[in-house]
Amino acid sequence: MMCPQCSKNASRVIDSRPSDDGRVIRRRRVCENCGYRFTTFERIEQTPILVIKKNGNREEFNREKVLRGVVRAAEKRPVTLESMNQVANRVEAQVRAQGESEINSRQIGEYVMQELIKLDDIAYIRFASVYRQFKDINGLMKEVQGLMENEKKTDSDSQIKDD
């Protein structure tokens, strides 16, 4: 593995452990040349899935783009990086479970929103405001009202179970 510090191809593994529920191997390495320590991740190479964008262009599905969107939506919220990674993992699993070689970007956005609504209301609203491209405050208010109605329903369902 090439060292990111000195670019020499002489590093050795000093620690390995599973990550992301066993789907990834995290390896700590040290450069034999300069002593720099760095981390690498080993994943199973999977068949590429093409994402059909709004403008009709196609690009390869990228889990990291999903994660960046989730991180941006959850910025300054009490959401751990681990839970954001889990959202990205679940979205990727849903995309791959489709069993298709192409998927519409809108569908990926819906998967992200389904996960974010369970994680953090504000992160969900932030993502929805960009994803759904609200034209005015009324669109945003409808989304917030829908979220509030959902919470009321969930609260009354849990009270019924408690009784």
Image (cartoon, rainbow, N blue to C red):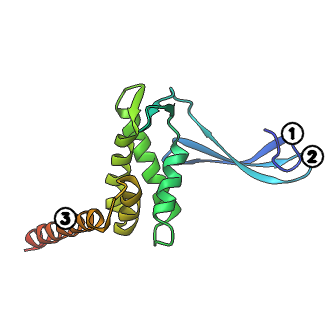
Name the N-terminal-most of marks 1 and 2.
1
Q: Are marks 2 and 3 in contact (CB under 8 Å)?
A: no
The residue labelled by disc 2 is 33
Image quadrant occupied by the C terminus: bottom left
Q: How far apart are the alpha carbons under marks 3 and 1?
A: 55 Å
What secondary structure is found at the residue carrying circle 3?
helix
Name the N-terminal-most of marks 3 and 1.
1
Q: Is residue 49 above or below residue 115?
A: above
For disc 1, the neighbor class at 10 Å (few under 14, some 14 to 19, many from 20) is some
The residue labelled by disc 1 is 10
Residue that appears at 41% across and 39% down: 54
Q: Is residue 49 above or below residue 132?
A: above
Image quadrant occupied by the N terminus: top right
Quarter of the rendering containing residue 152:
bottom left
Q: Are marks 1 and 2 in contact (CB under 8 Å)?
A: yes
Residue that appears at 51% across and 60% down: 71
Position of 162 with respect to 93 (left or right) is left
Q: Indicate which disc residue 150 carries.
A: 3
What secondary structure is found at the residue carrying circle 2?
loop
Q: Nearer the viewer, residue 79 or 146?
A: 146
Estimate the x, y position of residue 94 in percent, counting from the top left: 36, 40
What secondary structure is found at the residue carrying circle 1?
loop
Position of 44 with respect to 38 (left or right) is left
Quarter of the rendering containing residue 121:
bottom left
Q: Indicate which disc residue 144 carries.
A: none
Q: Nearer the viewer, residue 100 or 155?
A: 100
Farthest residue toward the front?
135
